[in-house]
Amino acid sequence: MKHFLICLLALFSLGAQAVTLDSLQQRFSEQPVLRAEFIQQRSVSGMDQKLNSSGNLLISREEGLWWQQQKPFALSLLLTNNRMVQTMAGQAPQVVTAQNNPQMFQFNGLLSALFHADHRALAQNFALDFSDKGQGKWVLILKPTTSPLNKLFKTITLDGQDFLNHINIDDMQGDSTQIQFFNQRTEPKTLTDAEKQHFSS
């Protein structure tokens, strides 16, 4: 009986290993494709009504990130290693590269690092405060340490469990943005033909 209890405790401790930034980054990097839905709520100082939007998110380890806002109006943001493309209905796409707007292009790397929990990349611009909340839950608070990020943001807080579930952004103007991700899916593990079109356009 004693041996049996020791085995049970060993199994429990293995299943309850602390979450670390390294283990989190490894877990996220092992997901070749992630699909999710999002709801975003923005509070602007001086405005009583909050600004709400919603849509879909697609992250491909090989291709990049595609953010598709559906409500209150259509807007898409494509991020790859060499460009950012924002598209709104009825308007010509706005393309940002490291050559034509290096400061804006920094946000490309920032967003990629956020969604991949790439703490080495994040540590170049932020002080990191990571907490294991138990049962696989975690919180990561980012405080910017470099310009221009420290002139724009107070803190960026990420939390989740198996996936990134929330991003909360507090900026220097007193505004805040809360993004909730849900219905996360990792299957199929390769992009569909329709999804590939977003990155080839």
Image: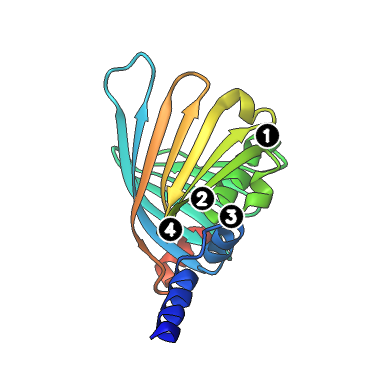
The residue carrying pointer 3 sits among few (fewer than 14), some (14 to 19) or many (20 or more) residues within 10 Å by Cα, namely many
- The image quarter in which residue 143 lies: top right
Which mark's residue is nearer the viewer, 1 or 2?
A: 1
Whether 54 is drawn above or below 101: the answer is: below
- Counting from the top left corner in percent of width and height, residue 136 is at 43, 59
Above or below 109: residue 152: above
Closer to the chain start, of discs 1 and 3, is: 3
Q: Secondary structure at mark 4?
A: loop
Q: Earlier in the sequence, mark 1 or mark 2?
A: 2
Residue pointed to by mark 4 = 163
Which labelled disc corresponds to residue 21?
3
Q: Nearer the viewer, residue 42 or 67?
A: 42
The residue under label 1 is 103
Compute the Cα span from label 4 to label 2: 21 Å
Rendering coords of residue 41 (x, y %): 33, 34
- The answer to whether residue 89 is visible is no
Q: Which mark is residue 190?
A: none
Residue contact between numbered discs 1 and 2, judged by CB atoms under 8 Å: no
Q: Mark 3 or mark 4, which is nearer to you?
A: 3
Upstream in sequence: badge 1 or badge 4? 1
